[in-house]
Image (cartoon, rainbow, N blue to C red):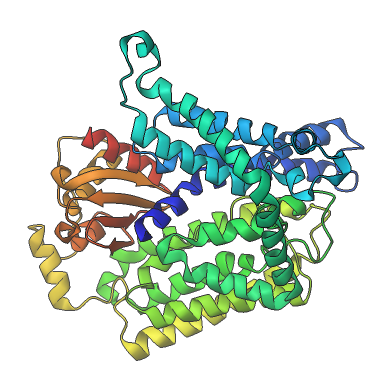
Amino acid sequence: MFSFLQRLGRSLMLPVAVLPAAALLMGIGYWIDPAGWGANNAAAAFFIKSGSAILDHLGILFAIGVALGMSKSRDGAVALAAVVGFLVVTNVLASDSVANLLGIKPEEVDRGFAKIDNVFVGIIIGLIAAWTFNKFHQTELPAALAFFSGRRLVPILVAFFAMLLSLILLFVWPLVFGALISFGEWMLGLGAVGAGLFGFFNRLLIPTGLHHALNAVFWFDVAGINDIGKFQSKDAVKGVTGMYQAGFFPVMMFGMPGAALAMYHSAKTARKKAVAGIFLAGAVSAFLTGVTEPVEFVFMFVAPALYLIHAILTGLSMFIAATFHWTAGFGFSAGFIDYFLSLKNPNANEPLMLLLLGVVYFFLYYGIFRFAIKALDIKTPGRESDEEIAAMALSEGKEVGAADDTTTGRTHKYDKLAERVIQGVGGADNVENMTNCATRLRFELKDNSLVDEQTLKRAGSAGVIKTGRKNAQVIIGTHVQQVADAVDKYLK
């Protein structure tokens, strides 16, 4: 079950990764026409409509992303099946269709069916499409129907399964939608406290990769909150919409770089040059894009108490921003790029105050991390014992501090890194499957006890997570896609 949820969380990253495009396009439109939402300028309307085309169809994007992520092969047939299934459900359960099916007046149709084109339904369809592909993509039909065998069978089956799902949802969806609305209203009723709790649990779930599922409830139109979508629309309430986003900016743009600087200053003098790249890359990634995992995984497991403090500070930032109604929004994550684009959004409310809070958070994170690392003797990168450093160097056959110049016969840096990663997870023969999310390589292994964490760290990994006996995640950073492509090529 845990492995399934991890894979689902990873799958959600594919459609989420499309959101920066929407944010960029709509952000440009708002800069051109901040008051008219495109009504006063054709160029602004062009950009805003282009961006909203993505945000208005997240349901089908999530269906495709989940189908690809949960299937055993990244085959186009499973994506096509997801589109087919989603179209069947959303057309059968459209309000006018429901009125006809139930023999009632259009105004008597439950309000939930007006929202059937949503992320929640998209995820269900994606799971159905992936299951169908995994089970039937190699099925052989009788000779007369052989043309429809294998992958061609998958979209056909999904269409029938989607019809069955539509029949179930015809009676179940009003109950599900009502429960989701109640949950969203309960969280909204908590106001700033609810925003703080969301920030706290969002960080706590990062190690499992399940934070994406929690995010979907508050950021997208699953429970009626849709904080990201509404922030980019006229449906926003100024100073309120964006409360589930704004508090992340001080943490990601300033808190994480402060933590990275503290860990760098805490490293041994002889090791600072060796680890500077890790912390600099992590800090820049967090500040610019809001991707914090390269920094978080450095201390997450070596200092769980410190990570708990990080989660509490995140919740506190969310609470403070929501209390004072400081709002800004993002399309991908709370980095400077999204912050800059949201400044001209008419729904942003006193966004400059988030920068002031961010400066406070930089010194707060720096001070707490520097004190805790020294007081508790936490072995963050660069603070390894002399014996560990010597052993690492000896295992590579070189002196401590020598440059890492592995010769593999390949010239591309990602090819060299891929070979190191494959070696670190026990060799190609130990790998059953490999996928990736925004910052991690996710392996299904025959035996994860063969994983060599030191080899992976020397290759540039910020951390390694092993779950169960067969799963392992290797934290790479924002260039994970290039590494994943190289690993995939090496395995094939």
Q: Nearer the viewer, residue 137 or 305?
A: 137
Examine the rendering and report whether any part of residue 15 can be seen. Answer: no
Total residue callouts: 0
Residue 467 drawn at (x, y percent): 29, 63
Q: Is residue 291 above or below residue 53?
A: below
Residue 66 drawn at (x, y percent): 48, 43
Q: Is residue 462 left or right of residue 198?
A: left
Residue 365 drawn at (x, y percent): 52, 78
Q: Nearer the viewer, residue 41 or 280?
A: 41
Q: Residue furthest top?
A: 144
Residue 408 drawn at (x, y percent): 15, 40
Quadrant for residue 170, please give it. top right
Q: Is residue 397 left or right of residue 247?
A: left
What residue do we see at 34% from left, 89% from top?
A: 376
Q: Quadrant of the C terminus?
A: top left
What residue do we see at 74% from left, 44% from top?
A: 113
Q: Nearer the viewer, residue 100 or 312?
A: 100
Q: Is residue 376 left or right of residue 342?
A: left
Q: Quadrant of the N terminus?
A: bottom left
What residue do we see at 32% from left, 14% from top?
A: 142
Quadrant for residue 354, please give it. bottom right
